[in-house]
Amino acid sequence: SEFVNAAGWLLTRKCIETVGLFEPLFPLYGEDQNYTQRLRFHGLFLGIIPAARMVHDRAERQGGKNSAGRALEASTFVLTRLLNINNSMLVNIFNSLKVFRRYGINRRSLRGFLSGLTHSIGYTRLRDAYRCPGYLLKPDRPQKILK
C-alpha cells in the first residue's frame, strides 16, 4: 500500500527541503497520500518501524457518511489522482473519471469541481516537480533550487 497516516510521521529537514510541506489544496484528507506520491517522485521513501506505536487523538465518527461526507471523499480521491506527478496528466484524468463514476457523480458536477481547480492543479504539478520547499515560495514564481 502507498498510504501511511501522516499523524505518525517524523520528517527530516532534508525531506521537507526537497519535497516541501503538505499541499494546501487538501482541506481535510488526502494530503498524506499526495505527500507519499511526491516522496516517490523525488526518489525518497517512507520508512515504517513496525515496533513503533502512536496515538492519533481525534473524534471518532459515529454512523455512516452523509452526502457531504461522500462528496468530500470523492473530491479528495480525485484530487490525489490529479496531483500525482508520477503519472501523466492524461492518466490522472482517466483515473479521476473512474472515481467519479464509482461515486455516481455526473459530468456537470465534475466540470464544476474542476473549473475552480484547473489553474491550481497545473501550478501545483509544476511546483511539485521542482526540488525545493515549493509551499514556501511565492505562488506566482516557482523557482528551481539545485543541490
Image: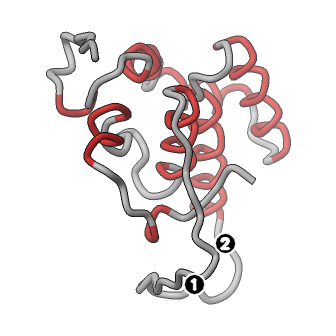
126 is higher (above) or lower (below) than 27? above
Q: Does residue 23 appear to the left or right of 143 in the view shown?
A: right
Front-most of residues 144 and 147: 147
Front-most of residues 89 and 132: 132
Callout 1 crowding tier (Cα within 10 Å): few <14, some 14–19, many ≥20: few
Mark 2 lies on residue: 65
118 is higher (above) or lower (below) than 22? above
Three-letter code, disc 2: Lys
**Disc 1, disc 2: CB below 8 Å?**
yes
State the residue lying farthest toward the left. 138
Front-most of residues 21 and 118: 21
The residue at 46%/70% (across/down) is 8
Mark 1 lies on residue: 61
42 is higher (above) or lower (below) than 23? above
Q: Secondary structure at mark 1?
A: loop
The residue at 27%/35% (across/down) is 17
Three-letter code, disc 1: Arg
Q: Does residue 102 appear to the left or right of 146 in the view shown?
A: right
The residue at 59%/38% (across/down) is 80
Q: Does residue 81 appear to the left or right of 24 in the view shown?
A: right
Q: Where does residue 63 sit, x and y in percent of width and height?
A: 68, 86
Q: Residue 43: which numbered mark, if any?
A: none
Question: Which of the 4 image quarters holds residue 129?
Answer: top left
The residue at 41%/23% (across/down) is 128
